Image (spheres, grey):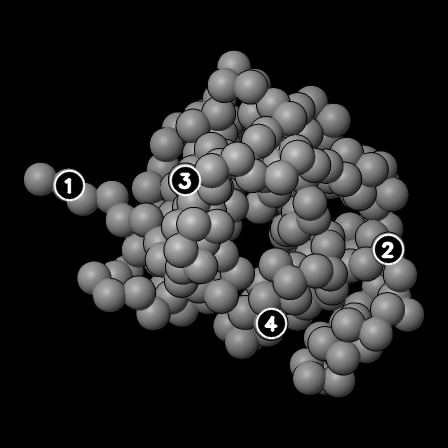
Amino acid sequence: MKIGIIGSGEVGQKLATAFLAEGHEVMLGTRNPGKEEVKKWKQQNPKGQCGTFGVTAQFGDILVLAVAGSVADSAIKLSGTSHFNNKIVIDATNPIAAAPPKDGVLSFFTDLNESLMERLQKQIPQAKMVKAFNSVGNAQMYKPTVKGGPPTMFICGDDEKAKKTVTEILTSFGWDTADMGKATAARAIEPLCILWCIPGFLENQWTHAFKLLKV
């Protein structure tokens, strides 16, 4: 498949490299294709392509939203909202506020009755959005090496076929998948980011992942 990554930070680069490793065509989307980190990624991944958000959104059959939650709205606008129509959009964003963590606990600019994913879905209503990759650090997003694995990736979204495709991607990436239902469930999945980050801020432990155990 053709995968367009909207966002060229650490998460975007990690996922772009992972999709390349799985044999997909990949374009890393960035606001500034001339950035040194983007050039470095291209040198390290010669089969990958780089482009602006708009070109990347046009390129991808599947799009990955891998920007900071605070700029997700503007990234979609720069990409061209129509370019998301009828495409699977993997939403890896979190609504992290600018405030520093308190006792290791991040603040969100959303509340428990609304998720960032739901806001973004309203912006691109014809996109088939699936929440994923928001509850783990980028170091473990591809082929996680945690003990007792494979760990669980929690997903949600309104389109069942899109979630099936994302589940297949997650399986190839080394994850178990737990489908939490409709997009409304992002209200519960996004705060997992807060929980995941607490050991990092308090103990500098950033390599863990969640596991859903069933009887």
Q: Earlier along the polypeptide chain: callout 3 or callout 4?
A: 4
Residue on which disc 1 sits: 214
Q: CA distance from mark 4 to mark 1?
A: 32 Å
Q: CA distance from mark 2 to mark 3?
A: 30 Å
Residue ranking furthest to the top: 113
Confirm or deny contact between disc 2 and disc 1 (CB under 8 A).
Answer: no
Residue on which disc 2 sits: 31
Q: Could you tell me how many numbered marks the image carries?
A: 4
Amino acid type for the residue under numbered disc 4: Thr
Q: Is residue 101 left or right of residue 84?
A: left
Res 121 seen here = no
The dot on residue 17 is: 4
Q: CA distance from mark 3 to mark 4?
A: 26 Å
Amino acid type for the residue under numbered disc 1: Lys
Kind of element beneath mark 1: loop
Q: Earlier along the polypeptide chain: callout 2 or callout 1?
A: 2
Confirm or deny contact between disc 2 and disc 3 (CB under 8 A).
Answer: no
